[in-house]
Image (cartoon, rainbow, N blue to C red):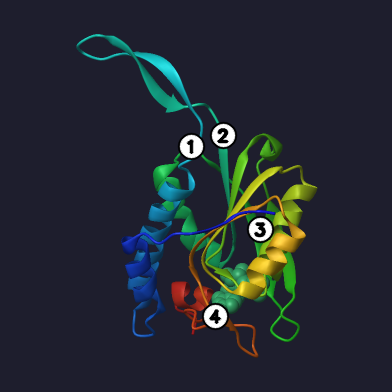
Amino acid sequence: MSKVYVFDHPLIQHKVSMMRDKNTTTKDFRQLAQEVVTLMTFEATRDLPLKEVEIETPICKGKFNMLAGEDLAVVPILRAGLGFLDGFMSLVPNAKVGFIGLYRDPNTHQPVEYYCKLPDDIGKRKIFVVDPMLATGGSGAAAVQFIKDRGGKDISFMCLIAAPEGIEVMQKAHPDVDIYIAAKDDHLNEHAYIVPGLGDAGDRLYGTK
Ligand code: PRP
Ligand code: URA
């Protein structure tokens, strides 16, 4: 079974709480999303392997740790996942980027795919799928399946807020995919929104409602 990591770092908790506030403006929400994702990326990459390389400082030669060449890819789920891209790339600028376009049908709550473009060498990369919300888990699980169908193997999922229902769906569908979250909320309401959550992440990021 996959692992679920809930980041309890005070800065992450504080910023996510600010994002939940319905009075937080679109501009501040976007800025906070970027900051939280940067902090989460820092935590989620803590197990990347290192190797020793020889470097010459202005004083002498020595052996020092550097990343062991594990190539990363980040795949935001459009559209709200795009709000996660800059924060991730600020720490891992060499990551390749894929995109998956999905929206939830408002009546069935099932994910509908409208776009998928992944790096050609996705099978060789450690992949982070990013999306602010894991609600029913339908979108996240479908996105991971698209990536697997195109050769992706080493996949993690990173989101701000997850409902217990979404975590269960994701773990059942993809027991090999670790999940990184900033907060695990209570439940879903009758419209499959996370309670207490932060509302519609896409609308809050882009000011569409
Ligand atoms: C939101 C969110 C997730 C999905 C989560 O996207 O960004 O992708 O809902 O819900 P689920 O776990 O029940 O599938 P939405 O469908 O609102 O599309 P958007 O990003 O284009 O706003
Ligand atoms: N999508 C969102 O943006 N928010 C939720 O609470 C659930 C799905």
Q: Residue at x 45, y 77 (%)?
A: 204
Residue 124: name its quadrant.
top right
Q: Which residue is mark 3?
A: 100
Which numbered disc flags the more N-terminal residue, 2 or 3?
2
**Measuring 39% from the left and 67% from the top, which residue is drawn there?**
30
Q: Residues within 10 Å of mark 4 (few under 14, many from 20)?
A: some
Q: Is residue 13 left or right of residue 119?
A: left
What kind of residue is marked 4? Asp
Q: Are marks 4 and 3 in contact (CB under 8 Å)?
A: no
Q: Nearer the viewer, residue 188 or 112?
A: 188
Quarter of the image that includes the N terminus: bottom right
Quarter where residue 72 is shown: top right
Whole-number angstrom distance, CA of label 4 to CA of label 2: 35 Å
Q: From the viewer's perspective, is the residue at label 4 or at label 3 nearer?
A: 4
Classify 10 Å Cα crowding around label 1: few (below 14), some (14-19), many (20 and above): few
Q: Residue furthest front?
A: 1
Quarter of the rendered structure image containing ligand 2: bottom right
Question: CB atoms at circles 1 and 2 under 8 Å apart?
Answer: yes
In the depicted view, which residue is nearer to us: 82 or 123? 123
Disc with the residue nearer the chain's start (4 vs 1): 1
Question: For mark 4, what is the residue?
Answer: 186
Disc with the residue nearer the chain's start (4 vs 3): 3
- Queried on whether the Cβ of the residue with tag 4 lies below 8 angstroms from ligand 2, the answer reads no
Label annotation for residue 71: 2
- Under mark 3, the amino acid is Ile
